[in-house]
Amino acid sequence: MKILLIVSAFNSLTQRVFCELQDMGHTVSIEFAINDKEMLDAVDSFKPDIIFSPYLKKFIPKEIFLNIPTFILHPGIRGDRGHNALDHAIRDEKKEWGVVILKANEEFDGGEIYSEVRFKMRDASKASIYRAEVSDATLKAMKELFINLEDENFKPIPQLQTPMHKYLTQEDRAIDWQKDTTKKIMKKVRFSDSYPGVKDEFFGIECYLFGVWQEEHLKGKPKEVIAKRDGAICVGTIDGAVWISHLIEDGKFKLQSTYVLKEKIKGVKEQRLPLIFDMTYKTFYEIGSYIEGEVAYLCFNFHNGAMTSEQCIRLKYAFDYIKESAKVVVLIGAEEFFSNGIHLNVLEDSKKQGEDGWSNINAMNDVVKSIIFSDEVITVASLHKNAGAGGVFLALACDYVVASDATVLNPHYKTLGLSGSEYHTYSLPKRVGEDKSKELLEACLPISAIKAKEINMIDEVYEKENYFYDLRKYAQTLVDDEDKYDDFIYEKQDYLEVKREYINQCKEEELKVMHPEFWDETSEFHTLRHEFVYKVCPIKTPERLKNA
């Protein structure tokens, strides 16, 4: 079929739908719901068989849905209507939730239901549930939609004419530090994450709170900032404490909490953890590990997969340390993303953008270098979540790459005005060849893990449901046969000895191209980064997404 996706943004859910439809053999085009004329023109040009909107904030013109079967995803169960559906579900502590696909009509969330999929709720943030359970349920519902459309006997289910639930304001989200328990505070931040956040004030600075972690050991007075660690602040509650990892100062953009509060918390004690935390109690941490026999699992959890220079340095040292204790090292990325490369928000905030950008890319390269040249261990990248830009090439630095079948990869930099580094001119052609490498970097489109395996970009894809069981099994097989393991290490050492100069030359050539992208004030990178960080709405749909 020819399927037009009319969306408000090319977010993680839209990208996964796009990849799945392409893998199913459909012809897909994407149109941003900027205005009625743009949508109507896209329909006239593409002439779709059906239209699907997995993420939509505007009404579709009736001239479209009256003439072409048009379906809208709503992240709520039958009878749920209105904005903030997932926010309400978390706030009300629903044990089960779901998604429905409705046929578009003139009534908001009022169309007939063509498919519905339910799921069990986790104790997690809205962003986490959206990217996991909602995303999984959407794909199941979409496939069910196609089956129902082919079934002559199928009859859609009427939507329940329940009242719209109320739009949640900041008053509904506000924390009362003198009354709210740790559990209640965490819930308020979680159902407001990643948008709009919880509005509050610290040291006279009005800001929005994001990224909450429970603290098990430290305690303080309600709303007292009692500690800081790796950019996060620890705030006392009536029955304990919580860590807040990120803030948005009113009118600005998301940054680590200590970046926003700056000198206001100069006297607050830095409560450090070991380089690699053993994860034995509840607290905020970014790098942890566990070891099973001769396999070490190095976990790094950087918010939204973005990595500052300092985070890169810590990850490099952690990797260098842990590889001494194992024969196989498995890199497991963030809870929501494996990695997305350099930290654009911190660079936007910098007063020395060229210098700090250059530092950031070189710090990323140092991590990748440690992994590529680790000739005494086997390395495995675990892409159980999405990866983009430098994060993809961080994974490709490993000897093996394993992914979940729900993972989407964005192996490109160009949409942000960058040529990229992270040794990608070595690692990508090595796996997919020069022609496919250029195609991926120029097309600037996401690909599924399944497609990535087909082109030899990654080695194995496992079903999401049993992913970590299969990952552990895979890692263990790498050490089970001692002779095979030794042969691999010897071959790796010989290969790196021969290729060392070439590999380093690839990186040096990448940096030559990148240097003006960071240092030249007229570089396109500075404009595109600013628009990305401030979430500037596009004025038209990018050409690369049309008839993709």
Image (spheres, rainbow, N blue to C red):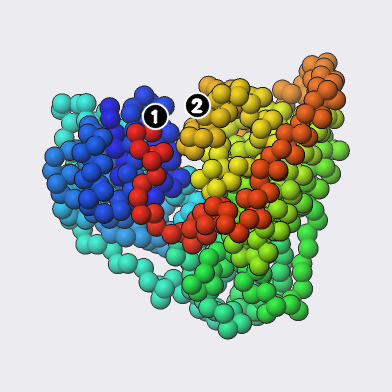
Pointer 1 or 2: first along the chain: 1
Element at label 2 = helix
The quarter holding residue 452 reads top right
Residue 539 appears at what percent x and percent y? Answer: 36, 54
According to the image, label 1 marks what residue? 22
Between 293 and 261, the one lying in front of the other is 261
Q: Which residue is drawn at 42% across and 63% down?
A: 91
Query: What's under tag 1, amino acid-wise?
Result: Gln
- The answer to whether the residues at label 1 and label 2 have Cβ atoms under 8 Å apart is yes
102 in relation to 124, above or below: above
Asked if one can make out residue 124 in the rendered structure from this viewpoint, the answer is no
Asked if one can make out residue 546 in the rendered structure from this viewpoint, the answer is yes
Q: Residue at x 80, y 25 (%)?
A: 499
Does 443 sit left or right of 526 as displayed? Answer: left
Element at label 1 = helix
Q: In which quarter of the image is the N terminus?
A: top left
Does 199 sit left or right of 378 as displayed? Answer: left
Query: What's under tag 2, amino acid-wise?
Result: Lys
According to the image, label 2 marks what residue? 451
Between 282 and 371, the one lying in front of the other is 371
Q: Residue at x 56, y 30 (%)?
A: 438
Query: In the drawing, what numbered circle is on residue 503?
Result: none
The quarter holding residue 217 reads bottom right
Q: Residue furthest bottom?
A: 204
Q: Quadrant of the C terminus?
A: top left
Residue 75 appears at what percent x and percent y? Answer: 35, 50
311 in relation to 492, above or below: below
